[in-house]
Image: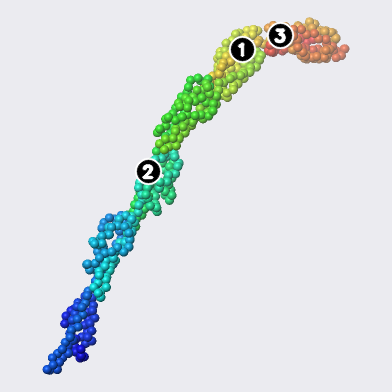
Amino acid sequence: EQAGGTWTQTSGAGGTFNAGAGTYTPAPGATTSTFAYTLVGTAPCINDTSVATININAQPNAGVDGNTTVCDSSVAPIDLFSLITGEQAGGTWTQTSGTGGTFNAGAGIYTPAPGATTSTFTYTLVGTAPCINDTSVATININAQPNAGTDGATITCENNPATINLFSLITGEQAGGTWTQTSGTGGTFNAAAGTFTPAMGATTSTFTYTLTGTAPCVNDSSVATVNVNMAPTATISYSGPYCVNTTSAQNVTLTGTGNYTGGTFSSTTGLSINATTGAITPSTSTPGTYVVTYTIPAGSSCLPVQTQTNVTITPKPVMTYTVTTPICDGSALNFVLSSNVPGTTYTWDASNNGLTGFNASGTQADINQVVHLTNPMVGGTITMVILPSANGCTGNPVTVNLVVNPNPVISSITVEDAQICSGSQVHIDVDGEPTGLTYTWTAVNNNGVIITSGTYSGTSANGALNLQLTTNSPTTIGTIQFEFTPIRNGCVGTPVLSQVI
């Protein structure tokens, strides 16, 4: 072309046309355009034109990226077109990252599924050359739905101290959750360790294991149930103590709660006991105090339960005694009673011959009564049967035969010659009753008299006394008396003085 012509746009729209410079700058949305270049002819020459055509292909627009977040537990289909904006139709979808779920490329739909991961999907529009392809990305952020596992349960007993691992009760749980106690009382709950230790009084309890979900995933929880059975209880008692001479079986009193029957009885060595019924036989047991144990066997997840009581088998009291003899008229009996069993008490019955005012029965409190002969000169007898008792146990009776002696009495003292010469012998006769007396004698009120034998006291078996007496001085009269005391069977009578010699 020759210079000097002019440009005009003859078709098309959009872009920027500079006629003076003869330039055109396309812009999005511009269409194919024609531009005429005209040179004006000098007459008779005519004008001349040429046409410049710019064919403009549209740049495809795949829209603006977008995203959403879902939980892998969601099964709702996601329209990928709803995530990007401003896109033109006619493109194709491809999955560029992530796994799991169901991708429908033709429909542009993705359906999550458990285990699916965050995924990206690219929407592509193919450009006509020289236009390039355009893409946008739809991102689906998939958060994992936490799984706290499946509920579980166990059975234990309040008296079983074994620690329970709560994780062992639920199944399929993921780690990282927290435990809370949602029901029940008693026992020891360790939330951090996920354990529960039963204790007496504990009740059935539930424990919730919770995993926190990341939105939009919800929390998940499972429940571990610990069913706690009550342990049986029992008490036993006997109505004893029992005497060792009791031959009949003595039953136990058993009370309790739960399955408390059917246990076994045992005791410390020496007690005759029926292991099944708990009955004891005192007569075949050794006296003593025993610990009886009743054991309820393990059952219903409970450990064995034991309860104890004491029972005493008292020994048969064996009485021994001492009694002071002789027993004289008007004196008190002097029994000292003893037994092999502390705290033994005694009762007695008695018969007598020749006594007056004698009680025929009594206890240890009045056994030592004063005895009186009906005839002071005639002895009497007592037959006493004493029965020992201790702790409900009666011993063998003991028979005691006693003799009550009269107190001897001097009836006369005869001095053959109350006046004798120094160096002569004095003869004294003493009589008394009852018969069979002996006498002790003592020289008293001695005034200047010497007994030649040198003996100033003694005993006379027959009441006769012969002594040679002298005076201290041949020229001085002396005087002396003798005191006689009667004795018979150990009983001592009242002393009597002789006349002055």
Residue 359 visible from this viewpoint: no
Question: On residue 153, which mark appears?
Answer: 2
- 113 vs 377, left or right, is left
70 and 109: which is toward the camera: 109
Q: Is residue 152 above or below residue 42?
A: above
154 and 387: which is toward the camera: 154
The mark closer to the camera, 1 or 2, is: 2
Residues tagged 3 and 2 counted as in contact (Cβ below 8 A): no
Image color mode: rainbow
- The residue indicated by pointer 3 is 437
* Three-letter residue code for mark 3: Leu
Residues tagged 3 and 1 counted as in contact (Cβ below 8 A): no
Q: Is residue 47 above or below residue 476?
A: below
* Circle 2 residues within 10 Å: few <14, some 14–19, many ≥20: some
* Circle 1 residues within 10 Å: few <14, some 14–19, many ≥20: few
Q: How far apart are labels 3 and 1 at the CA level?
A: 23 Å
- The residue indicated by pointer 1 is 401
* Three-letter residue code for mark 1: Asn
The residue lying furthest to the bottom in this view is: 43
